Image: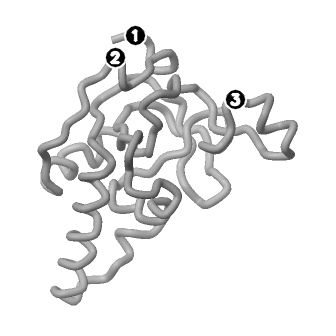
Amino acid sequence: MPALSRIILRDQAVTKTDFTAADLDKYIGKGYFRFQCLDWEVRDYSCGMMYADAEEAIEDGSTVLNGKSCVRNWRQLDAFSDSFGDGTDFVVMVFSGYRVGEGHDGEDVVTPERFLAAFDATRFLDILEEEKDLYRREGWSLLDFTV
C-alpha cells in the first residue's frame, strides 16, 4: 500500500461491504474514522469535501487544516452523515496517525500515517441508524454519537 496521503481508495484498497457494528468497534482505540470519497486522492490536509484542493478552498475563503478531520469512535460520524447522502461513492476510512489539533466542528485533526480499513459508506449508514435505534430502545445516552 502506498503512503496514505497518495492513495485513491477505489483503485488501491479493498472496501469491506459485509460488516457489523462489532467489526467497526474493533478499530476504536486503534485508529481514526472519516468519510472519504472513493475517487479522490487521500490528502494530508483537510479543506472540506466540496473542494478539489487547498487552492480552491482558500479562494473560496475556507480554512485549510494541517491533517485530516476525523473522529475516534465511528458512532461520532453521525454528526457529519447528512453531508454524504446515501453513501454512494464514499467509504468510511480508518487510519492511524498523530493528533495535531481540533477542527471547526470539534473533531480531531490527525496527520495520517497508515491506512487500516475501508468500509462501504452505504452499509455504514444503515448500521449507524441501527445502532442509534438500539441505544434508544435500551435507554442509553446518545453521547457516543456526538463530537
Q: Which residue is the site of mark 2?
A: 12
Q: Nearer the viewer, residue 80 or 87?
A: 87
> Residue placed at 28% from the left, 43% from the top?
120
> Residue placed at 27% from the left, 41% from the top?
119
Disc 3 marks a residue whose amino acid type is Asp
State which tag comes first along the sequence, 3 or 2: 2
Disc 1 marks a residue whose amino acid type is Pro
> Residue placed at 28% from the left, 64% from the top?
128
Pointers 3 and 2 in contact (C-beta within 8 Å):
no
Q: CA distance from mark 3 to mark 1?
A: 20 Å
Find residue 2 and name its label.
1
Q: In the shown orientation, is residue 116 left or right of residue 20?
A: right
Pointers 1 and 2 in contact (C-beta within 8 Å):
yes
State which tag comes first along the sequence, 3 or 1: 1
Q: Is residue 137 above or below residue 13?
A: below
The secondary structure type at the circle numbered 2 is helix
Q: CA distance from mark 1 to mark 2?
A: 8 Å
Q: Residue 29: x and y, percent?
A: 29, 46
Q: Nearer the viewer, residue 120 or 144?
A: 120
Q: Which residue is the site of mark 3?
A: 53
